[in-house]
Image (cartoon, grey):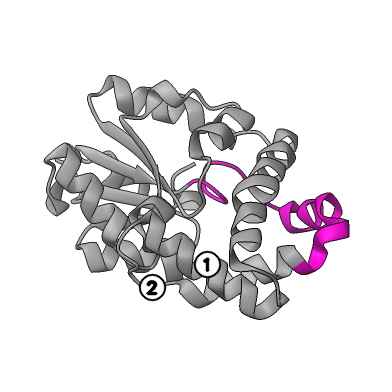
Amino acid sequence: MSIPAQPGTDASLLRPETELVILDLDGTLYDMRGLGIRLVFKFFFRLRWLKASRKARHSLEDHDFGDRQGYERALGLAMSEILGKDPDRCLDWYRGDFLLGFVQVLGHYKARKGLVPLLERLRDEGKTLTVVSAYSAVRERLDAIGIDTSLFSIIESCEDRGALKPSPKSFLAVMEQTGIGPGKTMAIGDLDAKDGEAARRAGIFYADILEVV
């Protein structure tokens, strides 16, 4: 006799009605322990800029700026207020130096043990796999940690949608794109306050990555 699956468990991921799986990237697809220190060393001579970008992004969480252009305008202004620099200069640094450096640092990381075989199995079972990351350069970061981007039907950043998690906007957009409703969708992440809350607002199941692999 089978036991009904409950939300937030590996069993619920594999239940027959699950058709769409939305995965976070950082901290979910790889163990990001030590990432903060590596980024500090990478941007040692731009440490104020790194801290400003983090503080600015945090201040923008859960606000909907409409689209990427609106989000980037708000990010540039937020960083400008912290650094006392021109907003366009701040945004150029974030889009260029920071994202490039982020990708380079991820060369020290690999996908979680057992994750890729799980993703391949789910794909072979007909599940639609997608990645929704808080940061841009998603494909480049997947490549950096050694995950084949062809596993995923949709790869996107919350920045592209103009709203960072815990806004459910990106999750809702993925469901709309795939035509798969909340009852057949599951999100997997590592931060309940962001990934989990976005999932709950979107009305979908959520599991922590450590419950899955």
Of callouts 2 and 1, the N-terminal one = 2
Q: Taking 191 as reference, is 132 left or right?
A: left
As displayed, is residue 206 above or below residue 119?
Answer: below
Q: Which residues are magenta?
A: 25-48
Q: Taking 82 as reference, is 4 left or right?
A: left
121 or 90, nearer to the observer: 90
175 or 96, nearer to the observer: 96
Regarding mark 2 in the picture, which secondary structure is present there? Answer: loop
Q: Position of residue 71 (x, y in %)?
A: 42, 63
Q: Taking 140 as reference, is 124 left or right?
A: left
For residue 28, say whether it is visible: yes
As displayed, is residue 158 above or below residue 165?
Answer: above
What residue is rendered at 74% in x and 58% in y?
A: 36
As displayed, is residue 126 above or below residue 5?
Answer: above
Q: Position of residue 150 (x, y in %)?
A: 40, 21
Q: Which corner quadrant of the image does residue 164 belong to?
A: bottom left
86 or 179, nearer to the observer: 86
Residue 208 is inside the magenta segment: no
What's under tag 2, amino acid-wise?
Asp
Regarding mark 1 in the picture, which secondary structure is present there? Answer: helix
Q: CA distance from mark 2 to mark 1?
A: 13 Å
What residue is rendered at 33% in x and 57% in y?
A: 67
Residue 45 is inside the magenta segment: yes
What residue is rendered at 87% in x and 57% in y?
A: 44
The N terminus, quarter of image: top left
Q: Which corner quadrant of the image does residue 170 belong to?
A: bottom left
Foreground: disc 2 or disc 1: 1
What's under tag 1, amino acid-wise?
Leu
Q: Which residue is mark 1?
A: 75
Number of the label disc, if any, that sits on residue 62: 2
